[in-house]
Amino acid sequence: MTDAFKPPLTLFLAAPRGFCAGVDRAIKIVEMALQKWGAPVYVRHEIVHNRYVVDGLRAKGAVFVKELDECPDDRPVIFSAHGVPKAVPAEAARREMIYVDATCPLVSKVHIEAGRHHDNGLQIIMIGHAGHPETVGTMGQLPPGEVLLVETAEDVATVAPRDPDRLAFVTQTTLSVDDTADIVAALQQRFPQIVGPHKEDICYATTNRQEAVKALAPHAEALLVVGAPNSSNSKRLVDVGRKAGCAYAQLVQRAADIDWRALDGVRSLGVTAGASAPDVLIEEVIDACRARFDVTIETVETAREDVEFKVPRVLREPA
């Protein structure tokens, strides 16, 4: 097919998109651990929710496991960016293992906040998704029953705290700002005394990626979000795109997943990526579009990110 026969397509690229500072740091932690201690290095759960990233690290010598009991005592273990219940590092310390915590500092902030509320005698309500590693990790910071989970505004009506006047709430960091606003409003209506976070729990990167999608949605007939099906923040970008006016929004792990028939006749396409999707996969999607269309790229930038998180000291010290 010559360029003359390629239909025109304007690609609206969301900025910011892709990797955030917490993901960047988590991947760097695994790579530095492999350099320092050699392979194998064990990682409890996917370090970040992206198959391409996980496969790449596996090829370098990382072994991904579900639970700590699958790890030998004499090899280092890394805890994923989503955070872990307190019992996990306690067990690693009991077994005298070398462990490195790659929990995103913004998730750790929520853990500290929950702990502070608990110390002040408050029961916590967590806004999050049941079973998501971050939610499991945050709820596991405190004894059973001290953190109650709500997933929707409807859940607020049935939640049963021990004292409605002694409550605080925290939020999974990767949710949609708009969705949580409804839940927070319902909580504040039912529990007027409830204490909220000092600063929004939803992380800056989640918010920024959602704002960029909202800004490009009016210009694009369709939206592709590069991300994994188990990535909460990626799935939220699809929701945000639909709500903002993209009639068709699709989550794709790689260019091979794109449903081209659904994009037949489309002349403007938005492209973004979740916080755990690497640039190489975004480029792959752009190249796939170029192979089929005469592409013009326009960037829709709503924020600039210069956040950087340090890796743990143990990795910066010589072996």
Image: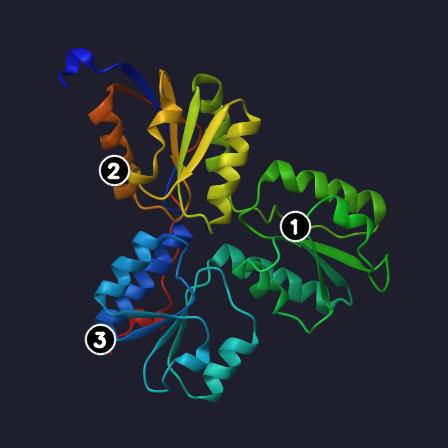
Label 3: which secondary element: loop
Relative side of 316 to 204, left or right? left
Identify residue for label 2. 284
Residue at coordinates 43% horizontally, 20% vertically from top-left?
220
Instruction: Place residue 309 in its image quadrant.
Output: bottom left
Label 2: which secondary element: helix
Query: How many residues crowd around disc 1 within 10 Å: few (fewer than 14), some, or many (20 or more)?
Result: few
Label 1 or label 3, whichever lies nearer to me, is 3
Label 1: which secondary element: loop
Residue 107 location in percent, x, y?
A: 53, 57
Foreground residue among 95 and 58: 58
308 lies above or below 138: above
Query: How many residues crowd around disc 2 within 10 Å: few (fewer than 14), some, or many (20 or more)?
Result: some
Residue 130 location in percent, x, y?
A: 62, 57
User: Counting residues from the N terminus, which is met first, the one under dot 3 or under dot 2?
Assistant: 3
Residue 33 visible in the current orientation = yes
Instruction: Place residue 254 in its image quadrant.
Output: top left
Which label is found at residue 181? Answer: none
Furthest residue to the front? 261
Furthest residue to the top? 4
Which label is found at residue 38? Answer: 3
Q: CA distance from mark 2 to mark 1?
A: 40 Å
Residue at coordinates 53% horizontally, 22% vertically from top-left?
245
Quarter of the image with the N terminus is: top left
Residue 240 location in percent, x, y?
A: 54, 33
Residue at coordinates 72% horizontally, 67% vertically from top-left?
118
Identify residue for label 1. 198
Residue 204 location in percent, x, y?
A: 50, 43
